[in-house]
Image (cartoon, grey):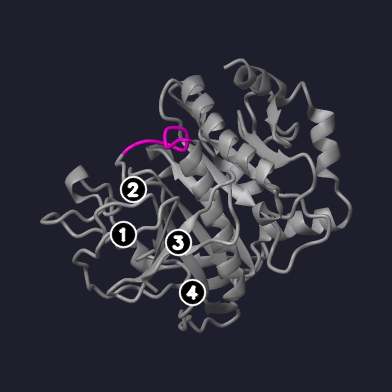
Amino acid sequence: MTSPVCLKRTVGGKEIFRRDHRKSDGRMLQLYGRARHALPLQPEDTNDIAQGGEIRHHPLRDEWNVYAAHRQNRTFKPSAAEDPLAPTLPGGPLTEIPFEDFELAIFENKFAAFHPSASDAANLDGIATEPAKGACDVVVYGPEPSGSLHTIGADRRQVLIGALIDRYETLFADGCGYVLPFENRGDEVGVTLHHPHGQIYGFERVPLVQQRAADTFAKGYDLASEITAAMPDYGIGQSGGVAAFVPRFARFPYEVWLAPRIRREGPWDCSDEELEALAEWLGEITRRYDALFEQPAATMMAFHAAPAGGSANYHFTVQFYPLLRAPGRMKYLASVEQHSGTFTVDVMPEAAALALRNL
């Protein structure tokens, strides 16, 4: 499809358009924006791509982990002149986005851990293995080579949320059992491309952590009541029906959750007012982290929504896990955390909320 289409869902009271393009190597690229993208195609790379890995079951942890050896050779901290997430300019190097300009782009990851066509898995006696079916997308926040969820502005964040809702619908329809949009930010998290971007993983199986959450909600856990109990002492703020707060049970110093005050299964279930507020808080929490840590803050952020088909009583959240505990001081996940799952938190959640609230 080369003609832009208007998404079914508006965010911020304005339309969002999508332009679909199948890249020369077969991968799909979607351009999202407020304007109908009509710029001509630029030259493209035709290199072959990997087709996902395999998953293996861990018998003692009862979890499935993915193995994708081809990811060892993925692009690692290229120079600004070789930025693969930049627009492809006439006479310039070929990038992943074969257009001179764009607002927001999502494309299939060249180094995908999960892929719908994955078909191979090792035959291991006593160990369950399967092809790593699913999807891996790269979400490019814009053509600018630097910036953050704060600096891209409220309108671009609204376009981002509209694009994520569109990808949720597509990946669920394609057979993914769980969809996880996320962002890794900062060298401390292991980021290999500094161009502002996030990712989306579509899992065939619901991951263990998300399945436990779904089971807990189904048993009656009431997150809305927890938010009410946590406010205002653990609250950072609220607007448009969305609360920003430090969970009383936070595992990371300065961990922050965003959640609608009314239970919603995912962003697709939210009102336009809630989506506008969510877009605002995505930028505001990023800004506050940068101010608190006095640098572009290393964070792990993810959307936690219900699995495909819905889940009883599920309450959607966006969760931020910072990798710093103070300016210049890393929060390392050392032996006890990694081996036992018991986190040691050096900053009390109520103190973290106060510090972030005062910024």
Residue in view at x 50 percent, y 42 percent: 157
Residue 44 in picture, x, y percent from top left: 22, 67
What is the CA distance from the residue labelled 1 to the residue labelled 2? 9 Å
Instruction: Kindly give the residue lying farthest to the right in the view shown.
Output: 220
What is the CA distance from the residue labelled 3 to the residue labelled 1? 28 Å
Question: What secondary structure is marked by label 1?
Answer: loop
Residue in view at x 82 percent, y 37 percent: 226
Considering the whole magenta stretch, tell me its main secondary structure. loop
Q: Amino acid at mark 3?
A: Arg
Q: Are marks 1 and 4 in contact (CB under 8 Å)?
A: no
Circle 3 or circle 2, nearest the eye:
3
Residue 309 in picture, x, y percent from top left: 73, 69
Q: In terms of sequence position, does the residue under pointer 4 or pointer 3 come before the other?
A: 3
Q: Amino acid at mark 4?
A: Glu
The crowd level at tag 2 (other Cα within 10 Å; few <14, some 14-19, many 20+) is some
Say which residue label 3 marks.
18
Give the answer, above or below, for where 339 lies relative to 153: below
Q: In terms of sequence position, does the residue under pointer 4 or pointer 2 come before the other?
A: 4
Say which residue label 4 marks.
54
Quadrant of res 238: top right
Membership of 149 in magenta stretch? yes
Say which residue label 1 marks.
74
Q: In terms of sequence position, does the residue under pointer 3 or pointer 1 come before the other?
A: 3
Circle 1 or circle 4, nearest the eye:
1
Instruction: Kindly give the residue lying farthest to the left in the view shown.
Output: 91
Start-end of magenta stretch: 146-153
- Decide if residue 336 is in sight here: no
Q: Are marks 1 and 2 in contact (CB under 8 Å)?
A: yes
